[in-house]
Image (cartoon, helix red, strand yellow):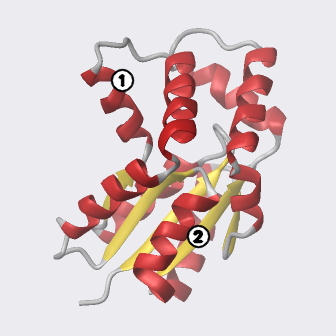
Amino acid sequence: MAQTIIGIVGMPASGKTVVAEYLAKKQGAMRIHLGAFIWNWLKNRGVKPSEEAGLMASLYLWAEYGDIPIANWAINQIKNAKNKKLIIIDSLRTMDEAQAFQLRYGGNFHIIAVLASPAVRLKRAQSRARFGSLSKLEFRMRDREELRLGVGDLIASSNHYIDGNQNIASVKKQADVILKHLT
């Protein structure tokens, strides 16, 4: 059975996880959140999760090893899901990650970018306050680091786009239209 692999990319708080969770639930697909690799890596080293710790761990892993550990971890997760026809990779961040999946899965790998304005994303990030309050400056610094890692290039090279500025119902409808073309 050929699997369809969909990578979801976007800036922080753009709606990536909303799309990934929706598609996974609706289709009975496996969802792999690449951030889980970072959080597990920190946990295994006794580091308390925080926005800053996650960013620093990401930068460290990227500088030391490139994207190979994260991509290989996800590929192993996919290998263990042989019975799943659809795999959703939540939170692609770099061109190297995407290239690893492209090399492995060829035409069965697709990228969907979720786009939302900085103002919308900041409001979302502040409302969810995952690790406490978030200032506009901290948010902009995080955006800058994400762009430095290559998220912008990956967004630009995506196969499909979802307007994440819209309400959740609209975002889900856009995801349905794209999924219809991919499966």
Mark 2 lies on a secondary structure that is strand
Picture quadrant where residue 82 is located:
bottom left
Mark 1 lies on a secondary structure that is helix
Q: Is residue 77 left or right of residue 149?
A: left
State yes or no: discs 2 and 1 in contact (Cβ < 8 Å). no
Amino acid marked by disc 2: Ile
Q: Is residue 88 left or right of residue 111?
A: left
Relative to 32, is 35 above or below? above
Q: Is residue 40 left or right of residue 11?
A: left
Relative to 71, is 85 above or below? below
Q: Is residue 140 visible?
A: yes
x 55%, y 69%: residue: 99
**Which callout, 2 or 1, points to the residue nearer the camera?**
1
Where does the image place residue 54, in percent across and percent down from the top left? 50, 25
The residue labelled by disc 2 is 111
Mark 2 to mark 1: distance in Å? 27 Å
The residue labelled by disc 1 is 42
**Which of these two is toward me, 157 or 86?**
157
Which of marks 1 and 2 precedes in the sequence?
1
**Which of these two is toward me, 85 or 179?**
85
Report the quarter where the C terminus lies.
bottom left
Picture quadrant where residue 56 is located:
top right
**Which of these two is toward me, 26 or 5?**
5
Where does the image place residue 89, in percent across and percent down from the top left? 43, 59
Where does the image place residue 83, in percent across and percent down from the top left? 16, 76
x 83%, y 33%: residue: 119
Amino acid marked by disc 1: Leu
Dot 2: within a 10 Å radius of its alpha carbon, few (fewer than 14), some, or many (20 or more) residues? many
